[in-house]
């Protein structure tokens, strides 16, 4: 059975839901192949899809403990709680439950961090030039301020300048 046939399987088996992840050879991590739209079914199964490119075959393996599968991504020695949609790891079921409410509103996603050994990959670059405004614009701001007389007199005979007033911004209160 291919991954594209899983929705048909779920439609025929209304008590079952299936999620499929696969190994990501580039990052030595995981990718989400299929995420079930049915989150509250009685029986839920997580499967790992293993591809053999030499033999052109693939196999599904049942994931009995998602926490153990992704345990190498954390430094914790206790059980972790994994989000099926973004594969992020959480320290408690309560934190995961609050995360799931927001995470399942979006399509499956995965966080990828740049490789610290590749400095070119760590640079932030803007590449969506088609989203820029076609015309240049500028912003003009008018900050109102008051001239406040200086209470102190500085009668320094060597001073070449003398401060008479201070600029103070208007803050919504009466400034005397």
Image: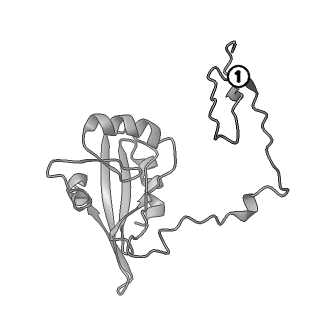
Expressed as whole percent of the image width and height from the top left, the position of residue 9 reads 42, 54
Q: Where on the picture, by quarter, is residue 99?
A: top left
- The residue sitting at the left extreme is 77
Residue 148 placed where, x, y %?
A: 70, 22
Residue drawn at 43 percent across, 36 percent down: 101
20 and 173: which is toward the camera: 173
| Label 1 element class | strand
Q: Residue 5 or 97: which is nearer the viewer?
A: 97
Residue assigned mark 1? 148
174 sits to left or right of 33: right
Q: In what quadrant of the picture does the C terminus appear? A: top right
Horizontal arrangement in the rendering, residue 58 relative to residue 159 (left or right): left
Report whether 94 appears left or right of 85: left
Identified at 74% across, 25% down, the residue is 147
Q: Is residue 165 above or below residue 172?
A: below
Residue farthest toward the bottom in the current orientation of the protein: 54
113 sits to left or right of 82: right
Q: Position of residue 23 (x, y in %)?
A: 34, 69
Q: Residue at x 37, y 34 (%)?
A: 98
Instruction: Give the answer, above or below, for where 57 lies relative to 4.
Output: below
Q: Residues within 10 Å of mark 1 (few under 14, many from 20)?
A: some
Q: Nearer the viewer, residue 39 or 134?
A: 134
Picture layout, residue 122 above or below residue 82: below
Residue 136 point in image, percent of width and height: 83, 55
The mark total stands at 1
Indicate the quadrant containing the N terminus: top left, top right, bottom left or bottom right.
Answer: bottom left
The chosen color scheme is one colour
């Amino acid at each position: 059975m291919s991954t594209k046939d899983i929705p048909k399987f779920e439609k025929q088996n209304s008590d079952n839901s299936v999620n499929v992840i696969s190994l990501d050879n580039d990052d030595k991590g995981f990718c989400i192949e299929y995420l079930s739209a049915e989150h509250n079914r009685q029986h839920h199964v997580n499967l790992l899809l293993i591809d053999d490119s030499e033999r052109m075959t693939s196999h599904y393996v049942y994931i009995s403990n998602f926490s153990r599968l992704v345990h190498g991504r954390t430094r914790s020695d206790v059980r972790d709680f994994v989000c099926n949609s973004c594969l992020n790891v959480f320290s408690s079921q309560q934190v995961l439950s609050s995360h799931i409410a927001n995470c399942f509103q979006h399509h499956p996603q995965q966080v990828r961090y740049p490789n610290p050994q590749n400095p070119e990959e760590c640079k932030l670059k803007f590449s969506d030039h088609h989203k820029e405004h076609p015309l240049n614009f500028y912003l003009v701001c008018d900050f109102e301020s008051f001239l406040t007389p200086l209470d102190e007199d500085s009668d320094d005979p060597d001073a070449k300048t003398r401060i008479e007033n201070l600029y103070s911004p208007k803050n919504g209160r009466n400034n005397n």
